[in-house]
Image: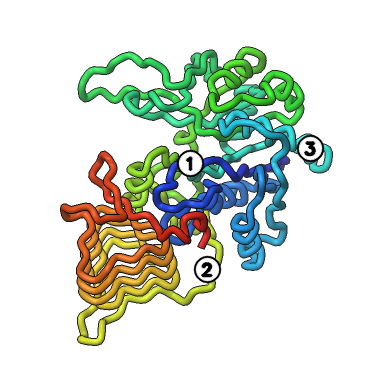
Amino acid sequence: MGRRMLGVIVAGGRPPLEAIGIADDAALTPFAGKYRFIDFALATMRNSGASSIYVMAPLPGPELRAHLARGELAGHRSDPPLLLPLPGEGGQGRSNRLRQTLAGCRELIRTHQPETIVVLLADHILQLDLRQLADAHDDLRADVTLAALPVPVGEATSRTVLRVAGDQQVHEVQRSPVLPATAPGSRAFALSWAGDVVVSAERLDALLDVVPPDGGEDDAGPLQALADALRVVAHDVLETRLPGCSQGPGAYWHDPTTLEAYYDAQMDLCTPRPALDLYNPAWPVRPVPSGLGPAKVVADAAGRAGQALNTLVSDGAVIRGGVVINGVLGHGVVIESGAEVEDSVLLDGCRIGRRARVRRAVIGAGAMVAAEEEIGYGALPPAGRLVDSGLTIIPPPAANVSDGSR
């Protein structure tokens, strides 16, 4: 298609995963071992044919700059995304960051003259063909299209919920709504705003006149004001299809609102047919090069074979006579002789000592599990904590808490 689409990715935002040492910028949250959240936003923009791509952040930190620079050096694209400061100040709410971003697009519109502006927040994972979202925006004659996701009613009470008419126009926005009870076993869903939008470039000034400069933490008020003044529609992101997907639509959206949700999404990657397809050649998601050697699974000095089953193993990781079943291993993870790891996520630089056992855990970057130590088998280790689901969380060493990009 010949549509001129300006793509803007918004970094920053408060990550919900501080307990495992994620950097201050949610865009740098690790996922699937070798990726960061922002890598999925960049892939979505590039694969969807955005004519120009920018990354905006409130205070672009050195980790974000380094991550984008490494991607540029890897030759991911001849015209790498340009990093710009996010104008203005305000709350951490998604609608507030959206307004700041669109305010910063005024000059970009004069430069690129796009028909549509697509804004993706890099605080979640999205795999979506934006061309189909833009087509729906045009077909519905919308000023603003909100990317939305159906969520079970029981999970909607902590989200921004959109109530729509038959033509998909948004007529009411609620934050943490009181939803009607559903019968046991029913599959009632509510439509939740995913944080991403399509805006008609010619309606940008009208949008900025409506949305208050500081919407604070609450998204419902600013979005309601927008829906009252302009034609705002909601489009279910799961209704789109990805090129190259032979089974199912292929579209994917995940918001790690809790550690359990973050863990569950990664455990799904270990199944034979995960919801997120990382192996679709028609929709590549390119990680930033780590500079580490290839992963390897080897025998220990006594000849005990290393084993990995249903496991994602990232660059530089070594399984040396240990066993990993249903795991996600980040860069440089080492599993020593006789160690057993099951149903766990190990972030960059973890080391699991000889004959240690780890089960149903998330291990922070650089953390060490001592020889013969047991995690997830009863007694909680001094440095760990247990969340409601029984998942064990081991934080990174204090020196690594603020460095989530390695």
First reached walking from the N terminus: tag 1 or tag 3: 3
First reached walking from the N terminus: tag 2 or tag 3: 3
Q: Is residue 270 visible?
A: no
Give how far across and how far down residue 117 sits, in percent: 68, 36
Residue found 61% across the figure and 47% down from its top: 45
First reached walking from the N terminus: tag 2 or tag 1: 1
Q: Is residue 400 visible?
A: yes
In the picture, the disc for residue 241 is: 1
- Tell me: residue 103, above or below residue 23: above
Q: Which secondary structure, mark 2?
A: loop
Residue found 36% across the figure and 24% down from its top: 189
Q: Indicate left or right for 202 with 388 as reference.
A: right
Residue at label 3? 109
Q: Are marks 2 and 3 in contact (CB under 8 Å)?
A: no
In the picture, the disc for residue 290 is: 2
Give how far across and how far down residue 175 sits, in percent: 47, 21
**What is the C-alpha distance between the residues marked 2 and 3?**
35 Å
Q: Which secondary structure, mark 3?
A: helix
The answer to which image quadrant residue 119 occupies is top right
Q: Indicate left or right for 35 with 226 as reference.
A: left
Callout 3 environment at 10 Å: few (<14), some (14 to 19), or many (20+)?
some
Residue found 47% across the figure and 77% down from its top: 293
Give how far across and how far down residue 298 sits, in percent: 30, 80
Residue found 61% across the figure and 62% down from its top: 71
Q: Indicate left or right for 306 with 346 as reference.
A: left
Q: Are marks 1 and 3 in contact (CB under 8 Å)?
A: no
* Three-letter amino acid code at the position of disc 1: Arg
Callout 2 environment at 10 Å: few (<14), some (14 to 19), or many (20+)?
some
**What is the C-alpha distance between the residues marked 2 and 1?**
31 Å
